[in-house]
Amino acid sequence: MIRLLLLLLCVSALPWVAVSYPLDGAEQTGISRLEGYRLAQQDKVPGNKLTAGAQLRQAQVILRVEGVAGDPLQSPDLQLTQKIIALLGSEADDYSISLLDLSDPAHPRYAEHNGSRIRNPGSVGKLVVALALFQALADIYPDDIAARERLLRNTIIVADEFIRSDHHRVPFWLPGEMRLQKRKLVEGDAANYWTYLDWMLSASSNAAASMVFKHVMLLRHFGRDYPVSAASEQAYFSQTSKKELSHDLMAALQFPLVRNGLDPEKLRQGGFFSKEGKRRVPGGSSVCTTRELMHYLLLMAQGKLVDEWSSLQIKRLIYITERRIRYASSPALKDAAVYFKSGSFYKCRPEYGFVCRKYQGNKLNLMNSVAIIESPAGAPQLHYMVTVTSNVLKKNSAVAHQTLATRLHALMQSLHPVHASQQ
């Protein structure tokens, strides 16, 4: 259920959750916790101190790819590719990686290893949901960015049965106690569209992603009449055949990919992230390749993902402004602005002497990382983008990606010694 309210959301601060979006964006977006994080940097509320790389203002998060001629992804640099393969060592066959070095925009260098290998994107597929939303907004309000902003700021989404079930926790501000609580979403939780987007991309909440996508379907179906009453929502999902709902789902997720020059055979999200969403609206399979994920990042960085405004909003939504994890947690990146999304999926099977642990599956151990690195933050001398998928069994894939990030950053520094010395 949604309501259109003009309300002022309470400020928040949460020291122990990895979050996104520039800290000065609370008033514009209504993502209430952002102001709390900003106040924490001033010691006015409890909270962790952020590194320089996590403290960019909205005005400093910009689209930086200009003057890149042609399509750099069509001409891989064999020398750079060999350097990356050497970094991977004996596990190279278990990795797919694409890297685009834009530190010298006039001479971009692209490298890839197993770049066309198909894998499940996991939570990286939430980037496709973000694209679906911003494409729908642009189609309905093509010449009215203010209308898109109002919809995201003022539309209140209330969690319903589509969230069942999810283990991810998200932050909630408790104004009476001047603190935040970290917990799972439950039915009845209300927040504006921006906040649900933030929960989807920062906390990687499957419940939030399912609500975001449910409302993408409603937005596409009702157009400028959206938001609609709870009764209209219910009628759409209960009275429309599953075959037609499935068609609407696929159109909502795949049409934006095609519109933006992306290949659904190489990058797609097949459906809802929740079990209940999948039951109510049948979908398909999800796939990705590192090359097509890089294509997504390049379009965004060029301002060509939907349009310049949409590209910038997605970039802000994946800007990490708190505790970094996996690839983004490399100490080498502490002063860098990191724009990041990751996803994991692991499975274990009985094996004598083996203990199943998180991110260390012995049957399947997928880890996916998508990152834009601008180092140092605010005045980058090194600027590169990386997409990685891996399936190294029995090895902590979160630590492996962190280590890879450190090695790749050292490689970038070696390729640009003058730039690196200025950091």
Image (cartoon, rainbow, N blue to C red):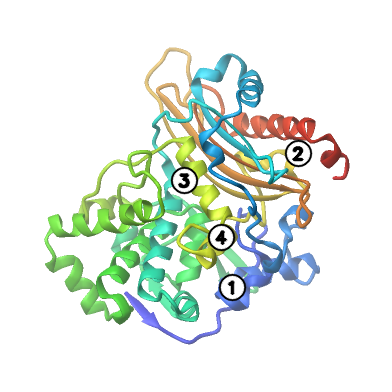
The image shows residue 226, relative to residue 159, as above or below, that is: below
Q: Amino acid at mark 3?
A: Val
Q: Which mark is residue 124?
A: 3
Residue where numbered disc 2 is placed: 332
User: What kind of element bears circle 2?
Assistant: helix
Secondary element under disc 4, as helix, strand or loop, is: helix
Residue closest to the far bottom = 6
Along the polypeptide, which appears first: circle 3 or circle 1? 1
For the residues labelled 4 and 3, say whether their Cβ atoms are less than 8 Å apart: no
- Looking at the rendered structure, the secondary structure element under dot 3 is helix
Q: Pick whichever of labels 4 and 3 is earlier in the sequence.
A: 3
The residue pinned by badge 4 equals: 317
Determine whether, in the image, residue 108 is placed left or right of residue 192.
right
Mark 2 in CB contact with mark 4 (< 8 angstroms): no
Quadrant (top left/top right/bottom left/bottom right) for the C terminus:
top right
Q: Nearer the viewer, residue 268 or 236?
A: 268
- Mark seen at residue 32: 1
Q: Which mark is residue 69?
A: none
Residue contact at pointers 1 and 4, CB within 8 angstroms: no
* Quarter location, residue 285: top left
Q: Nearer the viewer, mark 1 or mark 2?
A: 2
